[in-house]
Image: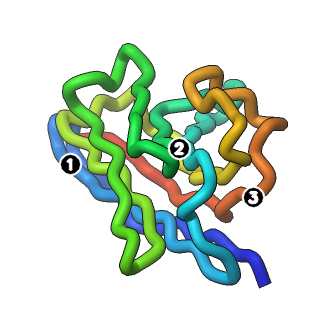
């Protein structure tokens, strides 16, 4: 059974850090594009970062460059999103998503992704 499990969210103060995990089961992440999206209440889902399994290339939304890092652990079939210097406006539910290798993940088009995690809540507040 194909499954993605998101975890690692929580409450953090502004300027703090969190590391999100996206664990895949039932398939290998070796041949896919993997992205992190987030959705705040009343707002559209937006892409944050992505990584291509083919060459390990990564992409980041401009507002998170230099603060967020996406990475993969092949042995654990897991993708991570390290988030530093978090801001209150980044409070949202964060989702990982997996799409085909042909996806240009930097476009962050949700309907191009076939599998989604259940989401993990990130709250940035003092």
Look at the image and tell me in which quarter the N terminus lies.
bottom right
Determine which residue is flagged by label 1: 17
In the depicted structure, whether residue 78 falls above or below residue 81: below
The x, y position of residue 99, in whole percent, is 70, 47
The structure residue drawn at horizontal position 58% and vertical position 53%, both measured from the top left corner, is 96
In the depicted structure, whether residue 72 falls above or below residue 28: above
Q: Is mark 3 on a helix, strand or loop?
A: strand
Question: Which residue is outermost to the top?
Answer: 62
Q: Nearest the camera: 111 or 92?
A: 111
Where residue 105 is drawn, which disc sits there? none
The x, y position of residue 112, in whole percent, is 79, 37
Question: Which residue is outermost to the front?
Answer: 54
How many residues crowd around disc 2 within 10 Å: few (fewer than 14), some, or many (20 or more)?
many
Q: How many marks?
A: 3
The structure residue drawn at horizontal position 53% and vertical position 66%, both measured from the top left corner, is 6
Mark 1 or mark 3: name the one nearer the start of the chain: 1
Look at the image and tell me in which quarter the C terminus lies.
top left
In the depicted structure, whether residue 83 falls above or below residue 65: below
In the depicted structure, whether residue 121 falls above or below residue 86: below
Determine which residue is flagged by label 3: 115
Compute the Cα span from label 1 to label 2: 16 Å
Determine which residue is flagged by label 2: 36
Whether residue 65 can be seen here: yes
Mark 1 or mark 2: name the one nearer the start of the chain: 1
Compute the Cα span from label 1 to label 3: 26 Å
How many residues crowd around disc 3 within 10 Å: few (fewer than 14), some, or many (20 or more)?
some
Q: Nearest the camera: 24 or 92?
A: 24
Whether residue 9 can be seen here: no
Q: Is mark 2 on a helix, strand or loop?
A: strand
Quick check: 57 left or right of 42? Answer: left
Compute the Cα span from label 2 to label 3: 12 Å
The structure residue drawn at horizontal position 43% and vertical position 50%, both measured from the top left corner, is 122
């Amino acid at each position: 059974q194909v499954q993605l499990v998101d975890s690692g969210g929580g409450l953090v103060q502004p300027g703090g850090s969190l590391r999100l995990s996206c664990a895949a089961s039932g398939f290998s992440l070796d041949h896919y594009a993997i992205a992190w999206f987030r959705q705040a209440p009343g707002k559209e889902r937006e892409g944050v970062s992505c990584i291509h399994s083919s060459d390990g290339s990564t992409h980041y939304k401009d507002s998170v460059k230099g603060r967020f890092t996406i990475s993969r652990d092949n042995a654990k079939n897991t993708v991570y999103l390290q988030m530093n210097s978090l801001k209150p406006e980044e409070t949202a539910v964060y989702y990982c998503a997996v799409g085909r290798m042909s996806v240009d993940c930097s476009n962050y088009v949700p309907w191009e992704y076939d599998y989604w995690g259940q989401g993990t809540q990130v709250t940035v507040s003092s």
